[in-house]
Amino acid sequence: MTKSFNRFSPKLMFAKMFSFIFFALSASIIFLLIKTVVMGIVNNTDIMQIFLNSINTGIIALAVFELALVINKEYGTEKEEHDAISSLRQTLPRFIGTVCVALSLEGLIMVIKYSQLDMAGNLYYPVAIITSTALLLTALGLFIHLTRER
């Protein structure tokens, strides 16, 4: 009886609900991305602007999808992990890696956009994003180094 009750635990139900919400958000972002590209091509919008925006939107969709996968893997199963560190070592690098790719691309897109618009005074925003990404990757590397199994 406890086994069937555990299948409907609040933790499991919320994990499945949040996973579904983030999967649905990711799918809707992809749908809007396709719609934006098609409408931009039909309306003769600048093709470079369309692709820069679509790369940005696609990376956001990928990050949301990865978040849904992490939530589903971490909290969506009935088994209890006693070692939280090993569980984090499995899921955290992939999610942080996706976020770092998203931040790096956002910074590079901002550099391209500001250089095309002759707004060199605003380049400290993308530099801050890229520097933060480097710090995040360094922190992830330090975490992996400090929690490695000996």
Image (cartoon, grey):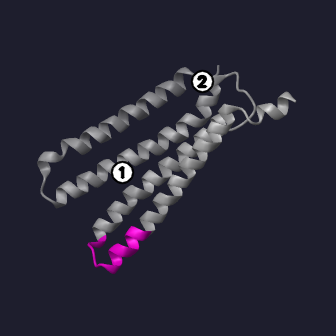
Is 46 magenta? The answer is yes
Q: Is residue 84 above or below residue 112?
A: above
Instruction: Name the residue carrying label 1.
Output: 105
Q: Secondary structure at mark 1?
A: helix
Looking at the rendering, the stretch of residues picked out in magenta corresponds to 35-47
Instruction: Name the residue carrying label 2.
Output: 148
Q: Position of residue 36 (x, y in %)?
A: 38, 68
Q: Amino acid at mark 2?
A: Arg
Is 11 magenta? The answer is no
Q: Is residue 133 left or right of residue 86?
A: left
What residue is rendered at 26% in x and 72% in y?
46
Q: Residues within 10 Å of mark 2 (few under 14, many from 20)?
A: few
Q: Quadrant of the rendered structure where residue 58 is?
A: bottom left
The quadrant of the rendering that contains the C terminus is top right
**Are the two marked residues, 1 and 2, in contact with CB atoms closer than 8 angstroms?**
no
Q: Amino acid at mark 1?
A: Leu
Q: Nearer the viewer, mark 1 or mark 2?
A: 1
Q: Secondary structure at mark 2?
A: loop
What residue is rendered at 42% in x and 70% in y?
35
The one of 6 and 41 positioned closer to us in this rendering: 6
Q: Position of residue 120 (x, y in %)?
A: 13, 50
Q: Position of residue 99 (x, y in %)?
A: 44, 43
What residue is rendered at 47% in x and 30% in y?
140
C-alpha distance separating marks 1 and 2: 29 Å
On residue 45, the disc is none
Q: Is residue 150 left or right of residue 63?
A: right
